[in-house]
Image (cartoon, helix red, strand yellow):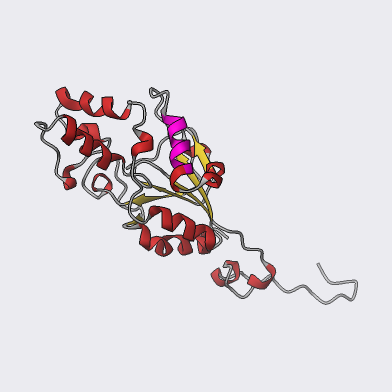
Amino acid sequence: RPNTRGLAPRTPAMKRSADDASPTGPGSSTRKARAPVVLVDMDGTLADFDGRILSLLTKHHPSLALPKDEDRKFPLSKSFPVDSQSLVTDLFHQKGFFTSLEPIKGAVEALHAMVAAGVTVFLCSAPLSKSPACAQEKVEWVAQHLGQEWVNRLILTRDKTLVRGDLLIDDAPEAKGTAMTPLWEHVYFDQPYNRVGSGPKVDASRRRLSAWSDWKKIVPHSIAMKS
């Protein structure tokens, strides 16, 4: 209707560009950027689960044929004939198995570097429901290899979709849990069993961390997306 109060007519609101919404765009001086929250899986991502199993099989069952690295499946037991799969599962149900795992190359250094760079890092792992010692041994592993203060960053859950975060770095072809639509982006930590064509649950569209030394190629992109 006509302007009857002598006020200047309002001009249409300008559309915001992608740069305006970015933490580094024109409007960034008035925006508060937060640190990205990165969730990191343990077995197969941070700790060398398969490597330890294969080493123990070589020691205790030397006649058992081991899969080639590129033929490893998820879980590892599926890489063996049905009548041999219990040999694998028996090993990781033994007391002391999870504390015996070696860190994957560069993992410990990368996590400390992330925190030093201002990234909020939590460990997000699914303990075995049929292994009474698994959860406690994961706590002990974290304290031993990352430091006691990192125990406060450890989240143990059978459903990772219940945990909030920006990224989940996980080797599993499909992350554990279905209760919620996850808020995080699942980034594959590269393993033979999560490569395209290795199985029906592999998502070819997911980004991939090929080595822990490359973490900066993944995390900075998330900062821009999750301001």
In the image, residue 226 sits, relative to residue 186, either above or below, namely below
Residue 154 percent across, percent down from the top left: 51, 41
The secondary structure that most of the magenta stretch takes on is: helix
The answer to whether 78 is drawn above or below residue 185 in the figure is above
Left or right: 33, with 200 as reference point: right
Image position, residue 116 (x, y; %) = 53, 61
Q: Is residue 206 magenta?
A: no
Per the rendered image, the range of residues in magenta is: 134-143
Give the number of marks.
Answer: 0
Q: Is residue 156 visible?
A: yes
Identified at 21% across, 26% down, the residue is: 87
The question of residue 139 being in magenta is answered with: yes
Q: Quadrant of residue 106?
A: bottom left
Q: Position of residue 39 (x, y in %)?
A: 48, 48
Q: Residue at x 46, y 63 (%)?
A: 221
Residue 213 in which image quadrant: bottom left
Residue name at image x 25 percent, y 42 percent: 51
Q: Position of residue 170 (x, y in %)?
A: 38, 46
Relative horizontal placement of residue 66, taking residue 76 as reference (left or right): left
Towards the viewer: 99 or 73: 99
